[in-house]
Amino acid sequence: IKCNSTPSFESISRSSLTVPFYVAPASVNEISTTMSFTYHYPEEINSIFPRAGFGGTLVTISGSGFLVSRGYRCRFGEMMTNAIRISDDKIMCIAPSLKPSAVPVSITNNEVDFVEAGSFLYFHELSIVSAFLQGPPRTTVKVQLGHNIESLGNERKEKNIAPPS
């Protein structure tokens, strides 16, 4: 079936438009069929959070028009991952493991048409082989490893900590 005419998105309400279409019989003895097709307004992306991390980072994409019936996927660079629709304005996906670099992030509901969400910066993954902490109970311990340290002793938060020189 080939559709020769589609409405412009300006004529569609902010959510969707359902239109009838007819399948004409190939011969006189067949009965024509009336069906419907729903045009959906494209999703709109407002933000991506966080904008940096490692493989395995849970990424939230906020915007509008994320419909219930669609199977969403996220694309980080060329790598596709599954996405979970949280609400009409939020989907979440897990960043795949990639080499440190900035990659474009986009979403799709059909793996053909993509909506750009922004970019995601991959950091070098850090691993702590061992740690020895000494001090009286309830002491705040400051760990200096580099940048983007989110959680430290006693729930204190630090960011952009310079490595020791």
Image (cartoon, rainbow, N blue to C red):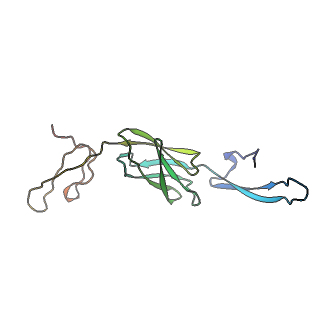
Q: Where is residue 69 in the image (x, y as percent from the top left)?
A: 59, 60
Quadrant where the image shows the C terminus: top left
Q: Which of these two is toward me, 63 or 78?
A: 78
Q: Where is residue 45 in the image (x, y as percent from the top left)?
A: 51, 48
Q: Which residue is drawn at 59% across and 45% down?
A: 113
In the image, 27 versus 68, the foreground residue is: 27
User: Residue 54 at what x, y percent from top left?
Assistant: 34, 47
Residue 95 as seen in the image, left or right of residue 163? right
On the rendered structure, is 74 left or right of 100?
right
Q: Position of residue 27 (x, y in %)?
A: 89, 54
Q: How many marks?
A: 0
Q: Which of 7 and 96 is in front in this view?
A: 96
Seen as rendered, the residue at the extreme bottom is 137
**Residue at 9% over, 56% down:** 134
Q: Is residue 93 left or right of residue 18?
A: left
Looking at the rendering, which quadrant does residue 125 occupy? Answer: top left
Q: Which residue is drawn at 36% across and 42% down?
A: 122
Tell me which corner region of the image, top left, top right, bottom left or bottom right, holds residue 133: bottom left
Residue sitting farthest toward the right: 28
Which residue is at 28% across, 46% downward?
148
